[in-house]
Amino acid sequence: MRVGLHALGIGDGARPEVIRAVAQAAEAHGFSRLWAGEHVVMVDTPVSRYPYSEDGRIAVPADADWLDPLIALGFAAAVTQDIGLATGVLLLAEHHPVVVAKQTATLDVLSAGRLTLGVGIGWSAEEFAALGVPFAGRGRRTEEYLAAMRTLWREDVATFEGDFTRFREVRVNPKPVRDRRIPVVMGGNGDTALRRAATIADGWYGFNLTAAQAVERVSVLAGHCARRNRPMAELTVAVALTDAAPELLPGLARAGVTEYVVVGAPPATPDEAGHWVAGLARRWLGNSRS
């Protein structure tokens, strides 16, 4: 099983010297991917419930620095050579799909084909309101935006007609490195997210689950794949757990998980951040280089 690291872009992890230290140490110690999530807007007193904690509150303070994930990953790409890069997740419905298609293809080219685009539909009505995007229908909007982006990546001269976006005979370059495709991972723990992963994505990213919940969710995902005659092996399956322990990894692998994502906040200085990554590698990878 691969082991990724979700630690960039927030708080101390938003400092350029810490991003450099974490990214280079993660690559040196054998982590598979660097993940970075997104919120364009945070509010001090949210009404919307955060779906990934029992109390419905996000752990990140509203006044914390939170970098744009594509820009943060672009910085990480420039200081590394081989480690994968993934948004975990980008809230696609909040953005214009033509712009995101351009940005992600650019990052894929500059990173030599290392980008995975993790997308989610979003949970904060306040965030959507601040951006002037309807909260209702965001799932359908996400599906359509993804179809439009794939059209732009695939076609030299692209035309698309949808309910939320349309364009005619346009060129968007560069094209992604790997057969004009960027792997897309669907975030979200609910049944609808799993259906989308099986139907329109190349993988799934489950977040803040227990190990038992992760195994159950993978089973549901496998069921969605079976009903569509899609081999489960076509999908990557990444999970981040609340009850994480290295001894759980073999069982998760048997259940169909292909990547365990370590989630953490790095220390404030580059030296400390590098040592922190080395400690994570010793725990999760058993890496003698650590």
Image: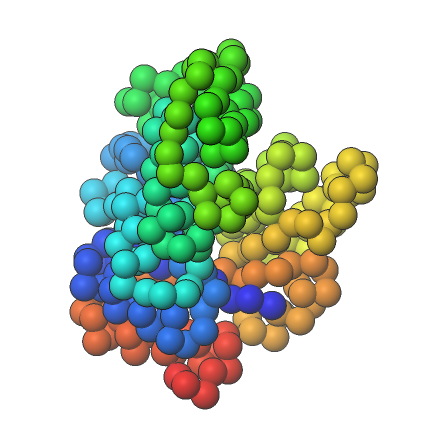
Residue 261 placed where, x, y %? 49, 60
Residue 286 placed where, x, y %? 50, 82
State the quadrant of the N terminus: bottom right
Residue at 47% in and 29% down: 156
Residue at 32% in and 61% down: 265
Where on the picture, by quarter, is residue 111?
bottom left
Farthest bottom residue? 288
State the quadrant of the C terminus: bottom left
- The reply, left or right, for residue 129 in relation to residue 201 is left
Residue at 55% in and 71% down: 245
Which of the two residues, 179 or 89, is positioned nearer the viewer here? Answer: 179
Q: Where 244 falls versus 145 (above or below)?
A: below
In this rendering, does residue 127 appear at all?
yes
Where on the picture, by quarter, is residue 99?
top left
- The reply, left or right, for residue 161 in relation to residue 10 is right
Which of the two residues, 245 or 165, is positioned nearer the viewer here? Answer: 165
